């Protein structure tokens, strides 16, 4: 069966809204259906699916999902925002910058971009609008800054890329720190430019900051301390050698549960069951996609798709710079129409040999891939962050996307720097 026809069927399946996991499963079995001599049969595919799920690093994903939900229900995002608003609030664009920094820290807790948008946005968008900021701007900045949740460690897409590439998850986490901080800095630079051009209601902002100052620095820090400590504990356990990323994910669940139940007392025992249900509902689709994409990637490997793509790129594009531009453009387009997990699991075996032939470190390529797909979170038609943010405010998705375009340009500028300056990703390794 021709590879091109296989991909056409795959795209048609996505276009007519067949679930991604089912589309992947169908396209995985088609080669053996149309060609009885094809070496992969149904039994092999089923074994490949279960084999893809039999992974210790994969256990980190449901744990980080659960930890993020507990902290969202426990009001951790509000505690984070208050401490940053205390110090930044009176500066130009101080409140939007406090939102961006909150997204950075919450991303270091949840590892998920949509979770970051939901947890931070549900709390900060009403605050920004009450302070006189435009609703669309407030929604757009949370949607874009939420993408930092998959770049700042710990990151679920980095775990998936590590599974697909064999790269160290710990190294990938380290590699995401500088790019994540750089993108956050660029977004804050844009927020300052926007607020200088459009103005701010300083009276309302000063009143909100005064409310925090009246509490006193000690009380604000005391309330926020355990929230800020969370990413320190998670990453500290990993890089001190106390725990692997998977074990650190489990630690984060128990830490979030303890803090929310006994320190902040923002949830109670009876809430735990509904939190577990939400976590299962969130993670189960990822599990099905992972199983099906593992089988699909095995089929592509046996059909020699990675070698074919590598030869095509090498024969048609001679310049390494041009090759990297083409790969980035391809990943950006994929990010617009495909979810992060299947994109990483399908494309990593195809594109990784191409970039390693150019001398690129697999860890750097992991950062490039995840940043590309993070941009896909805020670009139509499948921009998940846009839909999550829209559900919080009822602002139409395309309206948010238009307002987010200047911020996406800054994201793209950061992507180019990460692509052509390896030190940005590899300096901490």
Image: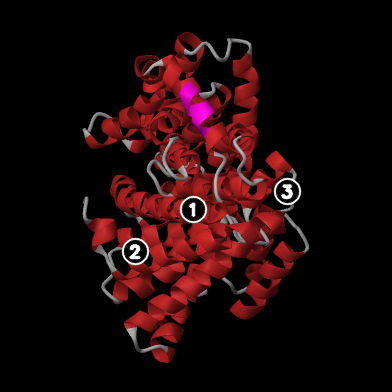
Residue at 46% across / 22% down in the picture?
212
Magenta portion: prevailing SS class: helix
Residue at 30% across / 76% down in the picture?
357
Q: Secondary structure at mark 3?
A: loop
- Please say whether residue 411 is one of the residues in the magenta stretch: no
**Display coloring:** secondary structure
Q: Secondary structure at mark 1?
A: helix
Question: Which residue is denoted by mark 1 in the rendering?
Answer: 196
Q: Can residue 260 be seen from the camera position used here?
A: yes
In the rendering, at what x and y percent does residue 275 appear? 61, 23
Q: Crowdedness of circle 1 by 10 Å Cα count: few (<14), some, many (20+)?
A: few
In the rendering, at what x and y percent does residue 332 appear? 53, 67
**Mark with earlier residue (1, 3):** 1
Observer-side mark, 1 or 3, equals 1
- Counting the numbered discs, the total is 3
Observer-side mark, 1 or 2, equals 1
Give the answer, above or below, for where 209 lies relative to 138.
Answer: above
Identify the image quadrant of the N terminus.
bottom right
Residues rendered magenta in the picture: 205-210
Identify the mark at residue 142; answer none if there is no mark: none
Question: Which residue is denoted by mark 2 in the rendering?
Answer: 418
Residue at 55% across / 14% down in the picture?
266
**Mark with earlier residue (1, 2):** 1
């Amino acid at each position: 069966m021709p590879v091109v026809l296989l991909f056409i069927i795959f795209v048609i399946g996505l276009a007519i809204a067949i679930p991604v996991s089912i589309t992947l499963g169908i396209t995985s079995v088609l080669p053996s259906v149309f060609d009885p001599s094809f070496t992969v049969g149904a039994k092999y595919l089923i074994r490949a699916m279960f084999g893809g799920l039999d992974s210790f690093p994969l256990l980190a994903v449901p744990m980080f999902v659960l930890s993020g939900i507990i902290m969202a229900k426990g009001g951790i995002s509000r505690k984070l925002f208050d401490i940053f608003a205390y110090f930044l609030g009176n500066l130009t664009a101080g409140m939007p910058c406090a939102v961006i920094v909150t997204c950075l820290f919450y991303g270091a807790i949840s590892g998920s971009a949509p979770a970051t948008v939901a947890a931070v946005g549900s709390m900060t968008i009403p605050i920004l609008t009450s302070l006189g900021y435009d609703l669309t701007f407030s929604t757009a900045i949370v949607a874009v800054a939420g993408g930092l949740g998959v770049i700042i460690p710990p990151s679920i897409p980095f775990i998936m890329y590590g599974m697909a590439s064999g790269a160290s998850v710990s190294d990938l986490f380290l590699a995401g720190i500088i790019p994540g901080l750089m993108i956050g800095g660029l977004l804050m630079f844009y927020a300052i430019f926007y607020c200088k051009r459009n103005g701010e209601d300083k009276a309302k902002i000063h009143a909100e900051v005064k409310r925090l100052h009246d509490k006193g620095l000690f009380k604000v820090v005391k309330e926020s301390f355990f929230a800020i400590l969370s990413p320190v504990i998670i990453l500290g356990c990993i890089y001190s050698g106390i725990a692997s990323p998977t074990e650190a994910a489990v630690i984060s669940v128990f830490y979030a549960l303890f803090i929310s139940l006994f320190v902040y007392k923002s949830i109670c025992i009876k809430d735990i069951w509904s939190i577990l249900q939400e976590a299962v509902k969130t993670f189960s689709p990822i599990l099905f996609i992972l199983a099906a994409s593992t089988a699909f990637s095995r089929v592509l490997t046996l059909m020699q798709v990675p070698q074919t793509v590598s030869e095509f790129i090498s024969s048609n594009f001679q310049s390494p710079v041009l090759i990297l531009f083409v790969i980035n453009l391809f990943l950006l387009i994929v990010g617009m129409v495909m979810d992060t997990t299947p994109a990483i699991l399908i494309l990593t075996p195809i594109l990784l040999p191409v970039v390693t032939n150019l001398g690129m470190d697999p860890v750097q390529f992991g950062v490039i891939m995840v940043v590309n797909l993070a941009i896909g979170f805020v670009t139509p038609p499948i921009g998940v962050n846009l839909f999550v943010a829209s559900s919080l405010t009822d602002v139409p998705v395309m309206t948010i996307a238009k307002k987010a375009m200047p911020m996406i340009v800054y994201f793209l500028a950061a992507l180019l720097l990460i692509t052509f300056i390896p030190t940005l990703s590899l300096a901490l390794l």
